[in-house]
Image (cartoon, rainbow, N blue to C red):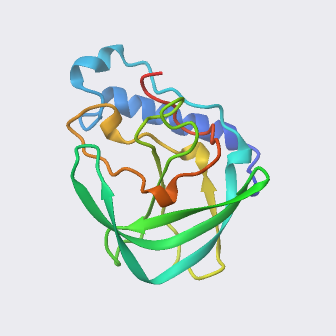
Amino acid sequence: MTDVPPDYADRIRENRAEKDRAFAEQRGSPIPPEERDDFDGLSYFDPDPDYRVTATVTVHEDPDPVEMETSDGRTVRYLRAVTFEFELGDDTHTLCGYRQSPDDSDIFVPFRDKTTGQQTYRGGRYMELTPDRELSDGDSVTLDFNLAYTPFCAFSDTFSCPLPPEENWLETTVPAGERDPAE
């Protein structure tokens, strides 16, 4: 676990309330317009600082291309930019972070865990990081699973979403972040 600000849970709840308002009201919401009047917010696990972890970075200087299947049967190409190693519970895990091009600063971290298809969306969940500088081998970053979110394709078939590749299937339970919208 990484250092947790004293108002951490409150900030997570505020972020979630803001997202719920956006999903209910904004034009670009993944909630179909005919369902927005009945939308009363997403389902979330309670904020838990144990799922805010410090990860050690390994940078892939020459990123390998990874073809990810999507929810509509197509494939999209990403570059495996970094690998994050972290402790969760008593075990060490890794997740890969991807970029669509070498120039992207954002790192996309799709993953599955043992809640996938049970308590969370069957297609997995996502996290995103925007490092404040170029990452180097051995750097530490925070991975906050409390911010893990459900891709838009869970709400509407009009969206196509990358599915986490097998290298990002965690063999543990991560009861943090968004729950299955159907739950």
34 on left or right of 123: left
> Which residue extends farthest right?
90
Q: Quadrant of residue 34?
A: top left
144 on left or right of 4: left
Q: Residue at x 60, y 47 (%)?
A: 145
Please, is residue 8 above or below residue 90 in the view? Answer: above
160 on left or right of 95: left
Residue 24 place in picture, x, y as percent: 35, 26
> Which residue extends farthest bottom?
61
Please, is residue 172 above or below residue 75 in the view? Answer: above
Q: Residue at x 29, y 44 (%)?
A: 71
Q: Quadrant of residue 45?
A: top right
Residue 148 place in picture, x, y as percent: 52, 45
Q: Nearer the viewer, residue 181 or 64?
A: 64
Residue 121 place in picture, x, y as percent: 44, 35
For the N terminus, the image quarter is bottom right
Q: Residue at x 52, y 69 (%)?
A: 131
Q: Residue at x 32, y 31 (%)?
A: 155
Please, is residue 63 above or below residue 78 in the view? Answer: below
Residue 152 place in picture, x, y as percent: 33, 39
Q: In this figure, what is the number of numbered marks?
A: 0
6 on left or right of 24: right
